[in-house]
Amino acid sequence: MLDISVLFLALPSLSADLGASASEQLWISDIYGFLIAGFLVTMGTLGDRIGRRRVLLFGAAAFGLASILAAYSTSPEMLIAARALLGIAGATIMPSTLALIFTMFPNPKQMGVAFSVWAGAMTAGVALGPVVGGVLLESFWWGSVFLIGVPVMLLLLVTGPFLLPNTKEASPGRLDPVSVILVLAAILPFIYGFKELARIGWDTLSFVAIIVGVVFGIVFVLRQRRLENPLLDVRLFAIKAVSGALLLSFLIAAVQGGAGLFIALQLQLVEGFSPMNAGLWLLVPTVVLLAGIFISSAVAKKIRPAYVLAAGTLISAIGMFVLTQVTATTGVALLIVGFTIVYLGVSPVGPLVSQMVVPAAPEDKAGSASSLSSTGGELGVALGVAAIGSIGTAVYRSEVTVPAEIAGTADGATAGESLAGALEVAKNLSTSVADSLITSGKEAFTSGLNIVAVVCTVAFVGLAGVAIATLRHVPPMSGDHGHGDEEAPEAVAEEERAPLASA
């Protein structure tokens, strides 16, 4: 999870080193999440069939090797390819770990604690990414942010065979390669089309890509309903707790991921902090986030999770409203206060979604269920970075004023594309022209942050309604495996499953 956000503070330095354009920067940031989302279902189901420990260890080895490749990339294209490989390898890790937790802790209270710790690690990874990246960038080159994964994966490879059981389905069926291809054919074109539509506006190719993704998604669902051993058991969506929790996880991750990118860049590009100092400032909301995870897990044992999640999204909406008041000259305090409030509000999502989704499935489908839980968050973060990042970029391009001295030149085009580009161009300009460009660029970037915050404020208010509408029937997390009075998939009547599965 560190790899999702560890590049937020490294983007300016790697862009300067590799010559990455604004579009390439977005691809470097989000191709990782896109590929994780595309392979999570496949890897979760593969773990159910051949063993979760086996898939986890294979993924760890591949992740370590891909991390080294990314660290020593010599071009934007090479780094994008390395990040894609990291995404495929990373897709093996999350569903395997979550499914292993479900099978290793049959005691409901222990399972609840384990889910909270797992969610805390996941959330802390995203939150601490900029912090770790900032500390490393203070002393090393940008590639060092990838190498931190290598010793961790080595530790897992050494200890995993002794500490982890190799649980799997008792009677696994054949993995359907057509379904694997259909998953990728549905997710990747849809994400690409959505990303390009958000970045450049209405475009025939983007619209066609989205339609292609939707069509393949429908074909995938229809195929799963016919298979005796489906890649994804779509009957899981018939459980309201599962479908509601996944929808909420997806949308909140999208808002949080996109806003997180902007905050990290605002600290570095507008406030002028070094990567390490920017990372240290981000420790404040991170600590609050981690505290909120365990507090909300305790509260959810007495109050229905729908109301805990709804309250959290409204708190986040307040934090986003604070961010609408940030200007290029207000300083860092208002920025950190607003973002801390946002992080406090989203803290219940990780543990509560996991406790509702995974235990609702039969044990032999734990990998499939956990991959769904992970897919919602990963896909949300990836789309959030793409969509919200594109909104901010569009605002910057429309509001920045490029000085007449460089207008119409290659430097002028670079300055008008991104604030990072403007700051780089300004180094070679006269003092008066550079000051004019930097001031305009910072104001334009902050305007992008304000617009993004307005969008996110409205989104969080709407998500409070989504939480209550979809999850109000789920009772407090009293240790009954998380799905409360909902029946497990095998107990759901076929006529109850069919309508939602068809949809």
Image (tube, helix red, strand yellow):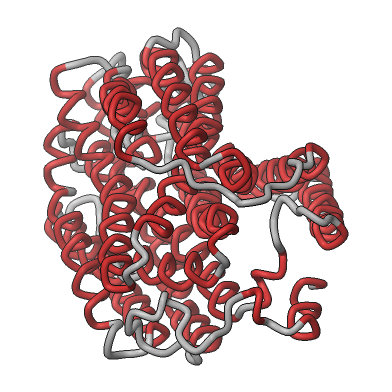
Q: Which quadrant of the rendered structure holds the C terminus? A: bottom right
Question: Can you give x and y, in whole percent of width and height, for residue 161 in the image?
Answer: 36, 31
Image: 361 above or below 193: below
Residue at 83% across / 40% down in the picture?
178
Q: Which quadrant of the rendered structure holds the N terminus? A: top left
Q: Is residue 398 visible?
A: no
Residue at 82% across / 72% down in the picture?
502
Quadrant in the rendering for residue 239: bottom right
- Foreground pick, 189 / 86: 86
Question: Can you give x and y, in whole percent of width and height, for residue 286 in the image?
Answer: 19, 54
- Foreground pick, 201 / 295: 295
**Residue 401 in the figure: left or right of residue 55:** left
Give the mark count.
0
Residue at 42% across / 53% down in the picture?
98
Q: Is residue 441 visible?
A: yes
Quadrant in the rendering for residue 103: bottom left
**Residue 42 in the figure: left or right of residue 74:** right
Question: Can you give x and y, in whole percent of width and height, for residue 47 in the image?
Answer: 56, 43
- Foreground pick, 193 / 100: 100
